[in-house]
Amino acid sequence: MKFLDLAKVYIRSGGGGGGCVSFRREKFVEFGGPDGGDGGKGGSVWAEAVDGLNTLIDFRYQQHFFAKNGQPGMGRQRTGKDGDDIVLKVPVGTEIIDEDEETLIADLTEVGQRVCLAKGGNGGFGNLHFKSSTNRAPSRANPGQEGIERTIWLRLKLIADAGLLGLPNAGKSTFLSAVSNARPKIADYPFTTLHPNLGVVGVDGKEFVMADIPGLIEGASEGRGLGDLFLGHVERCSVLLHLVDGTSSTITKDYRTILQELEAYSPELAAKPRITALNKIDALDAKTLAGRKRSLEKAVGAPVFLISGAAKKGLTEVLRALWAEIAADRAVSPEVKAWQP
């Protein structure tokens, strides 16, 4: 299945049915009077977060969603049938944004959350509704209310507790495959990862979700490489794990490159708790490793973990550090409340 995290959708709610003008004309009813029914209500357009979806690919093949109109009222005091609602089933973590691509309409972060995107029009009143002591035979009825037509954007941000950052070939996919059952594509060339991957990681009996996104390069905020298109998928994370390739001769520059791109994308994302790890230590001798660790710690201003995803060295210590940040964030963060349309 192809990964798609942004989709443009056109929606329209149903219009209400018109009211009916009708009078009773039974042969043996001396005073007939009005009996026109009201029109039915138009269908609404809803969005609902459902389990089992992790991409917006369904909205590539269908972008138009139009709810049905309500039926007009009829004689004998019969109300028209309401139009059927339409429900857009989206993955958990989907943001619904207005056409201006800035105004957030809803953020569906839990299974079962629903939001009304376009309310159906009300049905018009039939002439029976206008009957009064001074107007015994009204001959007017209201038309139905028109539906709402609008364009919206669906943007998916994966739900993960920890996110992986680093330059291409920093070993992010190898790390994810080593600590979880995820099997991302791994190869010895840049940009092997072309879309985000999720894996469930376990440490000391605790589990959390980790997201791996395509690598960033210098100038990603200006569109170089794959750009910063996928950074939105780590915005919800409690902590970021920054992997630095230990075999690189410019590890401090590599570290600062990622930091600069984060700050250019979002200062809030750059301010998230971040753990730095020097990867691929199995390919370094002790002297080189010690020197590069000192250089990186000086640039980071904090301790640096030494790991090897391929050799599975030092992974437990990093996972425990990640879990400590995640547990602290869960303790202070309020529960996400269900969306009230």
Image (spheres, rainbow, N blue to C red):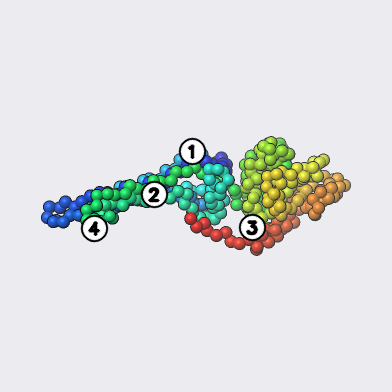
Tags 4 and 3 touching, CB below 8 Å? no
Q: Which amino acid does label 2 sit on?
A: Gly
Relative image position of residue 300 (x, y in whole percent) = 79, 50
Foreground mark, 4 or 3, reads 4
**Left or right: residue 132 compared with residue 238:** left
Distance of label 3 from label 1 (alpha carbons):
36 Å
Q: Residues within 10 Å of mark 3 (few under 14, many from 20)?
A: few
Q: Residue at x 70, y 44 (%)?
A: 264
- The residue carrying mark 4 is 134
Foreground mark, 2 or 4? 4
Is 107 on the left or on the right of 257, as rendered?
left
Rendered image: mark on residue 207? 3
* Residue topped by disc 1: 61
Q: In this view, does 258 lie to the left or right of 80?
A: right
Please tell me which residue is depicted at 71% across the width and 38% down the height of the picture: 219
Say which of 23 and 56 sits in front.
23
Which is nearer the N-term, disc 3 or disc 2? Answer: 2
SS at mark 2 in the image? loop
> In the rendered structure, which disc, 4 or 3, sits on the residue that comes first in sequence?
4
Element type where label 3 sits in the image: strand
| Residue 76, horizontal then vertical, whole percent | 22, 53
Residue occupying image coordinates x 68% and y 51%: 268
Label 4: state its secondary structure: loop
Which is in the foreground here, disc 3 or disc 2? 2
- The amino acid type found where label 3 is placed reads Glu
Closer to us: 139 or 23: 139
In the displayed image of the protein, which residue is found farthest to the left? 28
> Which amino acid type is shown beneath numbered disc 1?
Tyr
Residue, disc 2: 121
- Residue 337 at x, y = what percent? 55, 60
